[in-house]
Image: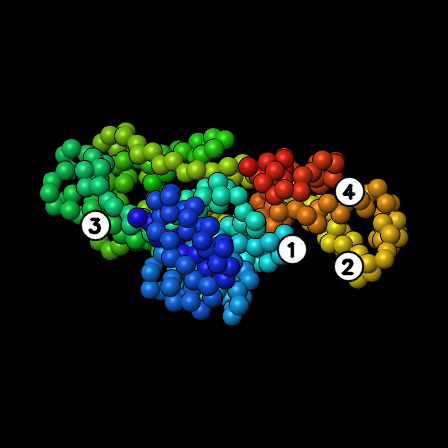
Amino acid sequence: MPTLLVVDDERNVLYALEKGLRCDGLRIVTAQTGKAGIEAASREQPDAVLLDVRLPDLSGLDVLKELRAADPKLPVIVMTTHGTAETAIEAMQRGAFDYLLKPWNLDELTGLVHKALEAGRLAHVRTVIDPDAVADCLPRRRRSAPNVKRALSAAAEIVRVIAEDAGKTFELLRPLIVAARVHPDRIDIELAADRVTDAMLDGGGSIGDRLDTRRDTDLAVAADDDRRILLTIGAQLQRAGMEMRFLVDGVEIGAPPDAGLVRLLTRAHSLARRFATNPGVTLEEAGAAEEMGAPYAARLMRLNFLAPDVVIAILNGRHPATLTATKLMADTRLPLAWTKQRQALGFA
């Protein structure tokens, strides 16, 4: 039974969550302070955490830091209020799995918790090598017991290298690739089975060393078969700054953000600061100070209520390809509810 740790100082919240989520097949562990939550996480080893940002002893962000230091793969959902959107953004930047607004909807909360549990489960799954699948990669004439043993050892090393540094995956596979095909939702890569066989069985040293020796040689030699091994990588076409790129699922890149979108967010924040520092200022006066008309200022102010993850995606250049500065300002019916915002802007 999956274990969910809930850290919140409000008894009524803990009671509601225990009652609502226990019916969903979860074991619920609760804590009312940040320190107690950290201790419970160490003791109970939960599969996911629901964490309130406002606790009596520690900041929720400090607790998040401690939890992720102890287990970087532990999914932590931060619970916040409408008035703490900036805290939600900071929590996402610090590695929170997601955030949830109070008061929450039980169905939405349950769905998010199960997504976090599944993400945590996948993050801790140990890659298992299928001996039969490895043996099938070998030509029949080379399927002796010693060769299968050596191939299994090489496959285990490949898994270890990829697990330790995912960035080495392409460099490791490049000498083996014979074709690559791009689709709207994936990239299919075909490996030559005979090259895989040679890499796993021929020569000494690590498999990386064996592949290095082949990088500068002609790999298009006659093979004893033309079988290919298909690798499928999930990817999606998104706008990255002013460019269109395929972003591999689960891989973060330092893409340049869209300057037009960032400029809008910056101007919206500057306009909001004028109202915060001078509560008596009118829309016309604030707009004039920012060198814009009142109608434009009214539309721009809406951007201060964007969902934190939408803001983060824009600043990181990972927003949908269809979202541009023109579209964002043209949509005069942008909803305040964050879930509906994501749908309207193409994030869901």
Give the class, few, some or many, for how many residues have Cα within 10 Å of label 2's Cα (few <14, many ≥20): few
Kind of residue at badge 3 = Ser
Residue 30 is situated, as x and y percent measured from the top left of the image, at 41, 59
SS label for mark 3? helix
As measured in the structure, the alpha-carbon distance from the residue carrying label 1 to the one carrying label 4 is 21 Å
As measured in the structure, the alpha-carbon distance from the residue carrying label 2 to the one carrying label 3 is 63 Å
Kind of residue at badge 2 = Ala
Kind of residue at badge 4 = Arg
Q: Nearer the viewer, mark 1 or mark 4?
A: 1
Q: How many marks?
A: 4
- State the residue position of label 4: 299
Residue 176 seen by the camera:
yes
As measured in the structure, the alpha-carbon distance from the residue carrying label 3 to the one carrying label 1 is 55 Å
SS label for mark 1? helix
The quarter of the picture where the C terminus appears is top right
As measured in the structure, the alpha-carbon distance from the residue carrying label 2 to the one carrying label 1 is 14 Å
- State the residue position of label 3: 153
Above or below, 273 relative to 293: below
- State the residue position of label 2: 276
Residue 107 is situated, as x and y percent measured from the top left of the image, at 48, 40
Give the class, few, some or many, for how many residues have Cα within 10 Å of label 1's Cα (few <14, many ≥20): few
Question: Image point 44% across, 35% down: which residue?
Answer: 187
| Corner quadrant of residue 191 | top left
77 left or right, relative to 25:
right
SS label for mark 4? helix
Kind of residue at badge 1 = Gly
Do residues under tags 2 and 1 come within 8 Å of each other at their CB atoms? no
As measured in the structure, the alpha-carbon distance from the residue carrying label 4 to the one carrying label 2 is 18 Å
Do residues under tags 3 and 4 come within 8 Å of each other at their CB atoms? no
- State the residue position of label 1: 83
Residue 85 is situated, as x and y percent measured from the top left of the image, at 62, 54
First along the sequence among labels 2 and 3 = 3
